[in-house]
Amino acid sequence: MSATSPTPILRATELVAGYGGPAVLRGVGLELTPGAAPVGILGESGVGKSTLVQALVGQVRPTGGQVTFEGRTVSRLGRRDKKRFRGAVRTVAQNGLDIDLRWTVDRALTGALTDARKAGRANGRSVADLLEDVALEPRLASRTVHSLSGGEKQRLALGLALTTRPDVLLLDEPLTAVDPSMRGEIARRLADTAREQSTAVLLVSHDVELVGRLCPTVHVLADGVFVASGPLPQILAAAGDDDAHVAVRDLATAAPLAAQRFR
């Protein structure tokens, strides 16, 4: 008897979405499954990457298709289901810190862990564990959030998202302010944590190197749809084909070192 395949927890089906004008997304399909390898979405600024994340969490209501969480339409979740959804699906955006900047790092993480425990989503991790997960030095625990660098704040945002042991982690350009030399290490630690906790990860970025390090499966978003999907080496290797989409060619041209690395 074959093992039962894991069930996607967050799914977009033929998703059409925008902001009142022409649709930004025009039929996107995506499945995120706890325990599965991270999924990446690559695309230039303005192609709809953030719109997709916002639609996945219900901030943008689809005009076509649907987004479902555990089989229920996200835009129609009841109060109890919304509470579960907020703990189970966490988003980290480029500027994603929504806390009092006068707090210390320790206070911010301790408070988030307490809230997670009250919500029934305790993860058994300590402040020290969370700092290690996102490559922040222990000495920073006593620092105020305001005094952190931009890259340190982005890593703290990741740590805060991990406090609920989320089923799904949606990352929208999460490490833009982090030194490029550190991004690979953070990606490695995040992948380890996600694997240990069976967290589904979606990484949305224009950073070919970062997406390639973290995500075995990648989608290239352009013209409101996925124009290429698969392992990044396979996508980049096809950039020179006659039928390759211009967005794929542009990715390979804009990041030649990454293109060479992942071929």
Image (cartoon, helix red, strand yellow):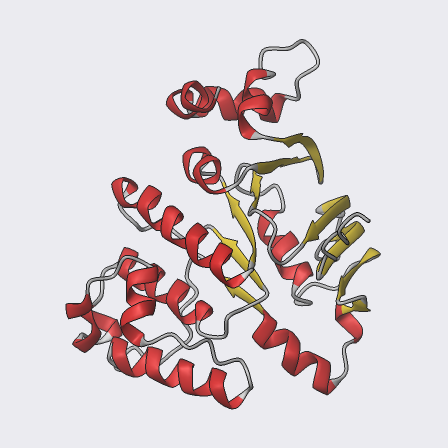
Above or below, 252 relative to 124: above
Q: Is residue 211 left or right of residue 146?
A: right
Please tell me which residue is depicted at 47% across the width and 42% down the height of the picture: 214
Residue 212 screen position, x and y as percent: 47, 35
Given the current orientation, which residue lies at the most extreme left position? Answer: 139
Q: Residue furthest right?
A: 64
Q: Residue 232 in the image: x percent, y percent?
A: 55, 29
Residue in view at x 53 percent, y 80 percent: 121
Taking the spot 19% from the left edge, 68% from the top edge, the residue there is: 138
* Residue 86 vertical placement versus 30 (above, below): below
Q: Viewer-proximal residue, 144 or 37?
A: 37
Which residue is most to the front?
1
Q: Quadrant of residue 103?
A: bottom left
Q: Seen in the image, is 59 located left or right of residue 107?
A: right
How many circles with numbers are drawn on the protein? 0
Asked if 252 appears above or below 82 in the picture, the reply is above
Q: Percent x, y for residue 47?
A: 61, 41
Q: Is residue 136 left or right of residue 4?
A: left
Instruction: Quadrant for residue 139, please give it.
Output: bottom left
Viewer-proximal residue among 5 and 38: 5
Q: Is residue 146 above or below residue 92?
A: below
**Which residue is found at the position 62% from the left and 21% from the top?**
246
